[in-house]
Image (spheres, rainbow, N blue to C red):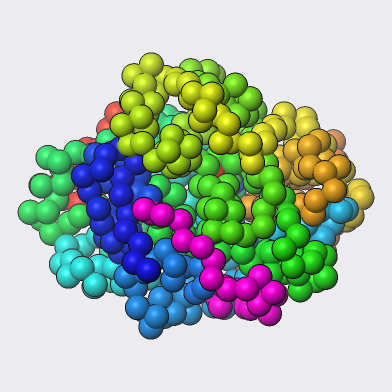
Amino acid sequence: MNIMYKSTRSNNEKVTASQAILKGLAEDGGLFVPEEIPALDVELETLSSMTYQETAYEVMKLFLSDFSEEELKACIRGAYDEKFDTDLIAPLVKKDGAYYLELFHGKTIAFKDMALSILPYLMTTAAKKNGVKNEIVILTATSGDTGKAALAGFADVPGTSIIVFYPKDGVSPIQKKQMLTQKGKNTNVVGIIGNFDDAQTGVKKMFNSKELAERMDKKGYQFSSANSINIGRLVPQIVYYVYAYGQLLKQGEISVGEKMNVVVPTGNFGNILAAYYAKNMGLPIDTLYCASNENKVLFDFFQSGKYDRKREFILTSSPSMDILISSNLERLIYRIAGEDADKTKALMEALVKEGNYEITPEMQEKLTCFQAGYASEGETAAAIRKVYEAADYVMDTHTAVASHVYYEKAAQSGTKTVIASTASPYKFTRSVMDAIDKEKYDSMTDFELVDELNRISGVTVPNAIEEIRTAPILHNTVCDKSEMQDTVEKILGL
Ligand SMILES: *Cc1c(COP(=O)(O)O)cnc(C)c1O
């Protein structure tokens, strides 16, 4: 079956998967969605004996149907190799009754690696397939983790360059150092005076500027996106939910066909949307728990049907979820609106103009498979402490938000529950160690804390951290949120 992609905001544009990956965003500003969600065509039983790479092929071939078997398998081979510190790629570990799906074993120790390890391969294959001659400029806004994972993925990939914008004061010290020490001739990192939503809005504006696109084309450049608005990010993220189900079967924790829940720490709604797509493919998922931090715009949305971004932006200890405009929610809205592009467009325009929108009761009825919860800063820290004390397992702050929601809402459901564990605790060492014992650790430096975390958890310090201990800072550009386009033009010499 050949799956084509269309925009969430009009019915004018129909493109192949490879074209959708190249473009990132549809011309009308909408997001690309598959015309239909394909059904999983392997027996559930078989999943238990499949490797991560085999599972990836089974899932991705359905969505990326214009890639040949050879092309797709080469992308998968290139992506999921020794860059990951375990052959399992995404191990599922049981701790205190919950199943933590560890998505942080890649190069930059956050779950963004799961998709951003493969995106450069998908992108360059797509460029070849479509006869693209321009250099592809990856333009990305990051709340901390996407930036580094995209930089690591695209560094020195021929035919591409990458520009990353991050909120100068809105990422963890380790996240920042990881980005600023990035090597590669084609990499650019820019701090903005503004928050993540400002960065994302600025990037979207550049994507939507026809005038800019024309000037770039004349110089031999075209933009694409490494943000989760790109379906080349979304599709690889479906894989690990299917894999998790196979692992539950393999470990004898569930029987074939038995349902599982998932709890996902959520910001831009990409990760949990992938789980929703997996459910729609026929994977036995019961409830999807959307877990937010104090920026609980999604929690309020699921409770009331009203999305309202007009509120204070709070900097939390889970910075990758400090987001008030969850881009990928648009794809869910489109689906519960009965794939009505006009309706979706009207709601998204209201969000830009008025800062809010409200869905109809009929749309709300289609959200019964979702539940939402959130964790305050205190609850997040308490969750880290609780699981450390109960199971000697140290989790990061984002995972802890999900863990809190698990104990609050899912633990008593009687259904086996998978928690998407989105970052290594080493990426947020200070917040994690503060949660465990603030008084004891307060005076230590970041790298002393790294060694202390190693001592109390017994988990080897990842390469990603060892690397930055002594690495020189290679990027120092900072601009105001209003100067993002000027900065891009300067970098590209337009
Ligand atoms: C990006 C990120 C999230 C949020 O994922 P979304 O797909 O944006 O909802 C959660 N945790 C970590 C560690 C992240 O890097």
Left or right of residue 488, residue 156 in this image: right
Residue that extends furthest to the left in the rendered view of this protein: 218
Left or right of residue 214, residue 368 in this image: right
The picture places residue 30, in percent across and down from the top left corner, at 32, 40
Residue 307, above or below 58: above
Look at the image and say whether residue 37 sits in the magenta stretch.
yes
Left or right of residue 55, residue 8 in this image: left
Report the residue at 59% width, 41% height from top. Answer: 266
Report the residue at 29% width, 68% height from top. Answer: 126
Residue 396, above or below 459: above
Residue 385 visible in rendering: no
Looking at the rendering, the stretch of residues picked out in magenta corresponds to: 34-56
The picture places residue 191, in percent across and down from the top left corner, at 40, 40
The picture places residue 40, in percent across and down from the top left corner, at 54, 66
Residue 356 visible in rendering: yes
Report the residue at 78% width, 32% height from top. Answer: 379
